[in-house]
Amino acid sequence: MKKLKYLFLSAMFVSMGTFAQEQKQPEKKQGHQNINKFKELYDEFATPNMFRTGSGAPGPAYYQQQADYKMDLELDDANAKLSGFETITYTNNSPDELKYLWVQLDQNMRAEDSKTPLIESGGMSKLTRPSTFASKYMEEAFDGGFNIEQVNDVNGNSLPHMINGTMMRVELPAGMTTGDKFSFQIKWWYNINDHTKDGGRSGYEYFEKNDNRIYVMAQFYPRMAVYNDVEGWQNAQFFGRDEFALPFGNFEVNITVPADHILDGTGRLTNRKDVFSKEMMKRFEKAKKSFDEPIEIVTQAEAEAAEKKKSNKTKTWKLYAENVRDFGFATSRKFIWDMMAVKLETKEVMAVSLYPAEANPLWGSWSTKTVASTLISYSKMTFDYPYHKAISASAPMGMEYPMICYNFGRPNADGTVSDRTKYGMMGVIIHEVGHNFFPMIVNSDERQWTWMDEGLNTFVQYVAQGDFGKLYPGALSEGHDAFPSRRGPAKNIVPYMGGNQDFIAPIMSKGMNTYQFGNNAYGKPATALNILRETVMGPELFDYAFKEYARRWKFKHPTPEDFFRTMEDASAMDLDWFWRGWFYTTDYTDIGLKEVKKLYVTSEPNEAAKRYAKNRGQDLSELGPLLFMVEEGSEEFNATMKNNDAVANSSSLKEYLMDNFTAEERKNIKEPKYFYNITFEKPGGLVMPLIVEYAYADGTKEKVTYPAQIWRHNDNEIKKAIASDKEIVSITIDPDLETADIDTSNNSWPKEVKQSKFDEFKSKN
């Protein structure tokens, strides 16, 4: 009988969940899909091969192409025109024969025949600003496309080429096989856009007061497209939103600008002594040893003096960069220039800022320190920053390139700075400097998978913003004990995920084809990774796996599957359910408390026991010692209480149990006094861990996280049996808002009654 005794003591708790299967299951609600949420992602993932393995690591046959550039550039400041002559040396490391090369001409997005304006729909607004109306319907369109003057081989022979929008196909004299190199030359020029009026990721900003410009230059040269094992040439057109896919290479760049300009950009300055004064050299040497405060290489007084008189001479700045995927530079006579050293785990690098007097005192106080903090945080999450410097240049936008980025945020005209401006400036600097890691080094395809660039970076930005407030507490305004983060916290994505499903696309969509681009490419993936780190995996497991991904794909071209597979490979966690829900669907989180039943143990056979015996053709007495449970408020419960059942109280229950166990077995017997049957439901389609906080009558609380796999057999509702020595007085799902639950009105028991706005008004008056 001992075996039967164990069986029925277990059945006491199992039966609490068994009755749910006898009840009619609720109909699936919006958000649910008729698929197994825990099905493996084999159908969505590419088959592992010799190029990319099933573990998410590069395979033994992995390859990537190389594109090296030598460029001579000249800035015509008077006419806002940039001219260039470049030699590209392309190396074919693929196993394929190439008969032509594809070159990106991104500036053609604003050429006269650009298709960009034609792909946008929308009628004329009945209410608009005069400046907007004039720019759309009255002003002549700005022609900023490339003027390609020649495409030759290095011997001066013309190469056949065809321009299709923002892409140029260059025909090769002979096919390139594995290991072949081919060099060719392009001569070009274009009119630089005023990006404050015409938009764009680069261009100039004009200061009418002193007739000067700040140039922040990027996508300014014909650039090689990526060729890889995933799709061959990545030659999708650039319409202005989806960013860039680029191969790595070495850059040797000579930039001729007005002699009174200050310039910095991607790469090491190789002729510093030619372009620096002796005083600047002294300040530079001092900056390399200053780890606490930035040192001004060019002061505000010197910059303001340069603005007042314009040199008619020129100066050439020479920069050389190894193993970068792109090149950018900033130049102006308005620039103040400061630097400080940053100590990382294995090396020291320089944090640098370029900004006009109009950006002070904000930029002088916090730009370079923000750069420094960002390098420390991102290096901790990935790998030590491999380049020798990171530059933040002041501009009315945010954009990133290797070693240099352009960031907004300036004081009011009277020098005052609002918290919104200050935190906005710091946030964009952290974000854009962070892009050095994703995608400038971990080089994902931005044009195809925007979230791998923006989403991953926004997630690490959220971590870095938390670090920034700790490293520089003086940066936080009064009343702020932490950096106010817009993207990352789960609760902030709720309005988007709970919105109209007609205007939400899965994260795994091409960026330019999504609705609500910021939420889709930045906010939702950043939130997903934050939840994955804090709630699903835990920081220790997550950080190890994330760092492994960064190290595996440093200076390489990863795909989404490489990321997903590496996170699982390095953590021993099956996360296919998470990737499917968050990245491949538009499901939302909504988990609620459907029912809480308090149960009592009775010695009087209940209906379930009678059915159990009847189904087996036995008498109840033949089944051995049994425990029977009744729900509070049920007819059985009322009958039991009327009979004054002796086993219904805890002391009798203990005696009853102890009589059925040996002395040795009694040592491991707990003494629960209260029993509950709790039903959780999931109106939302997104599978998530079930986080429950139990509050007890003695004032204590306990938070339990049930893994997401609790939903694996029933995507609509599940039951949990609780045996406790303390009485539960309330239950709350997701008390700290960790899961982006779009409806918290069903998260509490007893159900939380919220005041209506009318009742709130009455209580205040």
Image (tube, helix red, strand yellow):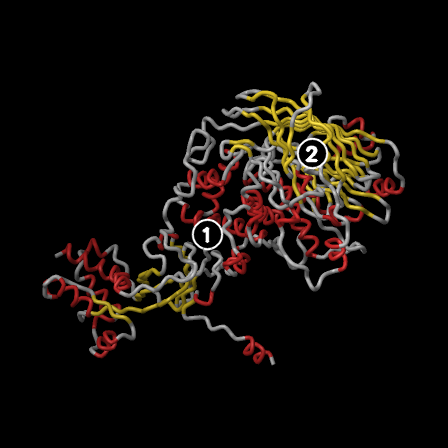
Q: Which residue is mark 2?
A: 221
- Mark 2 closeness class: few <14, some 14–19, many ≥20 residues within 10 Å: many
Q: Position of residue 282 (x, y in %)?
A: 79, 31
- Tell me the number on the disc at residue 37: none
Q: First in sequence: mark 2 or mark 1? A: 2
**Does 374 sit above or below residue 20?**
above
Query: If the image is split into quadrants, where does the C terminus sit?
Result: bottom right
Q: Is residue 725 visible?
A: no
Residue at image point 32% right, 69% down = 597
Quick check: 296 left or right of 448?
Answer: right
Quick check: 474 left or right of 628?
Answer: right
**Does 214 sit above or below residue 556?**
below
Please tell me how many numbered marks the rendered image carries.
2
Rendered image quadrant of residue 375? top right
Q: Position of residue 453 (x, y in %)?
A: 57, 42
Rendered image quadrant of residue 442? top right
**Does 206 sit above or below residue 630?**
above
Residue lying furthest top in this view?
155
Look at the numbered disc 1 and give the secondary structure of its residue: loop
Q: Position of residue 227 (x, y in %)?
A: 55, 31
Q: Which residue is mark 1?
A: 585
Amino acid on which disc 2 is placed: Tyr
Residue situated in front as seen by the camera: 22 or 499: 499
Amino acid on which disc 1 is placed: Thr
